[in-house]
Image: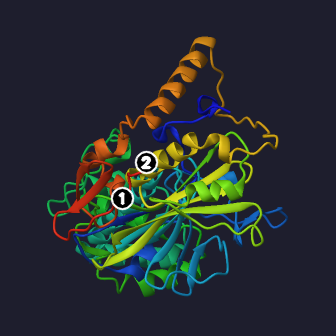
């Protein structure tokens, strides 16, 4: 079999199934974790009693209708939880675990001074989830400031709440935009916004600024106690809102960049392999491969070890792993797209140069599955795809690859190794990564 018949896709065209991405908050000087856990709004939903729930790794798979972009489904902090109890596992002791809906699917966020998000299918989804949580916390902080700056009006609202129960609805101002656009110090609380009906007759006819603040605080309490019984709502008000100093955080609650810690990318070789021969071919620099047929007859691991800086600035060993099945199916796990792209093409060059040795004579069988995102190709589009694939194979063999993520890593910090700000130097067959302060070297581009 000639390498010209080996199917291959450019690295930047592959999709990743799961990833772990870290968003540091370097300018936050304090986080009131119990208050954030108690005050973040959450969906008022329950699991159907007679539903056939699916599980994955001991956790409930949320029904599709639970995935509302930007809305929190469940939260865990310490020994407490809010919303859906997805699993009985213990939460992270120093973080709030938040499951939040996105434009694609729910993702899990570990919220602390370093936000860690697991399961996002793309970097854009990760940003979407983190931005939604940060925005909610910032808005609630403004709500609490309005309450604390108008304590007499707040007490009047609470007295009415005790008398009337939870029925404080009626006169409703667009609270989110009302507070977002409010200048609390100047009491300019009727600023225009795209999301609020500024032409509302009730708003325009009001002249008493105290009455406006009363309505705003009333609606804030309605939002924060949504889904609670009157008794539960009063307990929340007396034990959370009244003694609360109004600060959920101090400093600047915004991230400046983010880094990936782990990414999983699946791809297919397009043929079955002889695993013993494949292990021998791969077991030389920059890879290490040890395969024991007596212990595992379906999967072998091809590793690349390298040095990295951990969160404390210490040099530790990390690794890239290609999990190779006999069928030719591969799951590639690595720390970031930039370094993974280099290893991906190094791996494929080894495959292309040794195709006749590593290919098995067993039939390659795959079931083709279609999805809602499937598309058809015209003949011209298919011919163009075949030509681009042939060109890519030729460029890999002749070392003419143009690395997408190396060329653009300075424009997107998520593509760089965690905690490292590198300068790249190419010398012969070796790629040197030279940090600005702590210098170390890794030769990961040699074949």
Q: Which residue is mark 2?
A: 341
Residue visible at 65% across and 63% down in the picture = 45
Judged from the image, the secondary structure of the residue bearing numbered disc 2 is helix
Q: Position of 92 compared to 63: left or right?
A: left
Which mark's residue is nearer the viewer, 2 or 1?
2
Residue 398 screen position, x and y as percent = 42, 34
Q: Is residue 122 left or right of residue 316?
A: right
* Residue 370, visible in the rendered structure: yes
| Residue holding disc 1 | 135
**What residue lies at 50% left-to-right and 24% top-to-bottom?**
388
Count of residue discs: 2
Task: Mark 2 or mark 1: name the one nearer the start of the chain.
Answer: 1
Place of residue 387 in the rendered image (x, y in percent of width and height, measured from the top left) = 53, 20
Looking at the image, residue 160 lies above or below residue 394: below
Image quarter for residue 365?
A: top right
Residue 327 tag number: none
Mark 1 lies on a secondary structure that is helix
Tell me whether the residue at label 2 lies in contact with that at label 1, contact meaning CB atoms closer than 8 angstroms. Answer: no
Q: Is residue 242 above or below residue 179?
A: below
User: What colour-coding does the image apply?
Assistant: rainbow
Q: Quadrant of the N terminus?
A: top right
Query: Dot 1, crowdedness within 10 Å: few (<14), some or many (≥20)?
Result: some
Query: Residue pushed farthest top?
Result: 380
The spot of residue 107 in percent (x, y) is 54, 60
Q: Tell me if I can see residue 171 in this picture.
A: no
């Amino acid at each position: 079999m000639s390498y010209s018949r080996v199917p291959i896709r450019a690295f930047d065209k592959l999709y990743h199934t799961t990833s772990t991405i870290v968003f540091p908050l370097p300018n936050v000087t304090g986080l009131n974790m119990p208050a954030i856990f108690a005050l973040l709004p959450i969906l008022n939903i329950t699991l159907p009693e007679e539903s056939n729930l699916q599980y994955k790794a001991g956790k409930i798979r949320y029904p599709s209708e639970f995935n509302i972009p930007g809305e929190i489904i469940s939260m865990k902090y310490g020994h407490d939880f809010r919303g859906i109890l997805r699993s009985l596992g213990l939460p992270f002791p120093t973080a709030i675990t938040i499951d939040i809906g996105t434009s694609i699917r729910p993702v899990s966020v570990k919220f602390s001074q370093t936000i860690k998000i697991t399961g996002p299918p793309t970097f854009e989804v990760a940003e979407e989830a983190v931005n939604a949580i940060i925005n909610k916390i910032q808005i609630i902080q403004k709500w609490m400031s309005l309450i604390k700056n108008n304590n007499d009006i707040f007490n009047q609202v609470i007295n009415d709440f005790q008398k009337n129960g939870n029925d404080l609805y009626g006169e409703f101002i667009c609270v989110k935009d009302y507070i977002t656009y409010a200048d609390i110090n100047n009491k300019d609380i009727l600023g225009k916004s795209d999301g609020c009906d500024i032409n509302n007759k009730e708003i325009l006819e009001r002249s008493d600024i105290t009455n406006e603040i009363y309505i705003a605080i009333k609606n804030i309490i309605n939002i924060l106690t949504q889904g609670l019984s009157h008794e539960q709502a009063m307990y929340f008000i007396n034990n959370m809102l009244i003694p609360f100093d109004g600060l959920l955080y101090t400093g600047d609650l915004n991230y400046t960049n983010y880094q990936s810690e782990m990414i999983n990318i699946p791809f297919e070789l397009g043929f079955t392999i002889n695993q013993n021969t494949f292990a021998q071919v791969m077991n030389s620099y920059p890879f290490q491969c040890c395969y024991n047929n007596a212990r595992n007859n379906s999967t072998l691991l091809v590793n690349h070890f390298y040095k990295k800086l951990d969160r404390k600035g210490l040099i530790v060993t990390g690794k890239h792993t290609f999990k190779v099945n006999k069928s030719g199916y591969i799951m590639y796990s690595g720390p970031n797209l930039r370094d993974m792209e280099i290893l991906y093409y190094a791996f494929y060059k080894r495959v292309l140069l040794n195709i006749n040795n590593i290919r098995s004579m067993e039939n390659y069988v795959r079931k083709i599955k279609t999805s809602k995102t499937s598309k058809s190709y015209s003949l011209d589009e298919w011919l163009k795809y075949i030509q681009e694939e042939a060109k890519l194979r030729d460029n890999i063999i002749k070392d003419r690859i143009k690395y997408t993520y190396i060329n653009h890593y300075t424009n997107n910090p998520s593509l760089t190794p965690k905690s490292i700000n590198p300068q790249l130097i190419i010398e012969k067959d070796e790629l040197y990564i030279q940090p600005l302060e702590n210098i170390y070297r890794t030769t990961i581009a040699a074949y």
